[in-house]
Image (spheres, coloured by chain):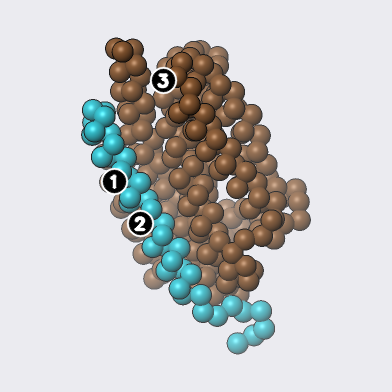
Chain colours: A cyan, B brown
Amino acid sequence: MPAGVLTGGEEFVAAAYIVSFVVLALFAGTMIWRARQEGAL
Amino acid sequence: MKHVWASGAAAVLLLSVGTYIGFFHAPVEQYMGITQKIMYVHVPTAWTALLAFTAAFVASVGWLWKRAWTWDYLLESTIEVGIVLGCLLSVQGALWAKPTWGVYWDWDPRLTSVAVMVLTYAGIAALRSFVDDPVKRATWSSVASALGYVNVIFVYLCVKWLRTLHQPQSSPSTVDPAMVLPLRINAFGMIFLAIFLVALRYRMARARRARELEA
């Protein structure tokens, strides 16, 4: 492996994707719920 | 309403396909290894956050010029979506920074200006919740949003103007063609998701205004 090449980091990639999609799903779900509660849907 | 749900469905489909291609078909980057795959979610999130704040700027100018409530609904919805995307891009960036820079955070011009951007719009959202008079609320938040947009431009350009730890913008011209496809698909996915969220939030703002008028 040449110098300066990054190895590993799988846990950071997994964390970035899991956090992103969980946050976006929760935000979208909450938005739909709030819109229904407020009679906007 | 069909268009709103269609936008949400398009977002789910595009983000699923883009992420799949990014993980299983795009090559592993030569120097950053697998860590670079964070790009396929981080960059679309960042682009869409900047687009949301650009839409907020357009809405604020629209309100100040035309005084039509539709602009205020758009301002309220784009700011809220932009704040969430702004927070998310900062977390994604930190998770990319740790394995590549060795730290989660650095007071680099790009990171600092993004933090200022998120706090500015969070402050504007807070301001909107404090002011009861709808006209004052719309006008004050529009002025603050228009002024805050100066920093959004700085966020975009600081990596070109200044010597920063953060790399310059990724675009199809600076990314290997094999990596452009998932990046582009996820960018459209994130834009459709933002349209879906803004459309729902816009309807809520409109419903709240209708209740204010009734009261």
Whole-percent x and y of residue A23? 38, 53
- Name which of mark 1 and mark 2 comes first in the sequence: 2
Q: Which residue in the protein does label 1 denote?
A: A29
* Vertical position of residue B42 compared to residue B71: above or below: below
Disc 1 marks a residue whose amino acid type is Gly
Residue placed at 70% from the left, 47% from the top?
B158
Q: Camera-side residue: B172 or B99?
A: B99
Mark 1 in CB contact with mark 2 (< 8 angstroms): no
Q: Which residue in the protein does label 2 denote?
A: A22
Q: Camera-side residue: B100 or B1?
A: B100
Given the image, what chain letter belongs to the residue carrying mark 3?
Answer: B
Mark 3 in CB contact with mark 2 (< 8 angstroms): no
Disc 1 element:
helix
Label 3 to label 2: alpha-carbon separation? 31 Å
Disc 2 marks a residue whose amino acid type is Val
Instruction: Using a 10 Å C-alpha cutoff, classify the residue at mark 3 as few (fewer than 14 neighbours), some (14 to 19) or many (20 or more).
Output: some
Residue placed at 35% from the left, 56% from the top?
A22
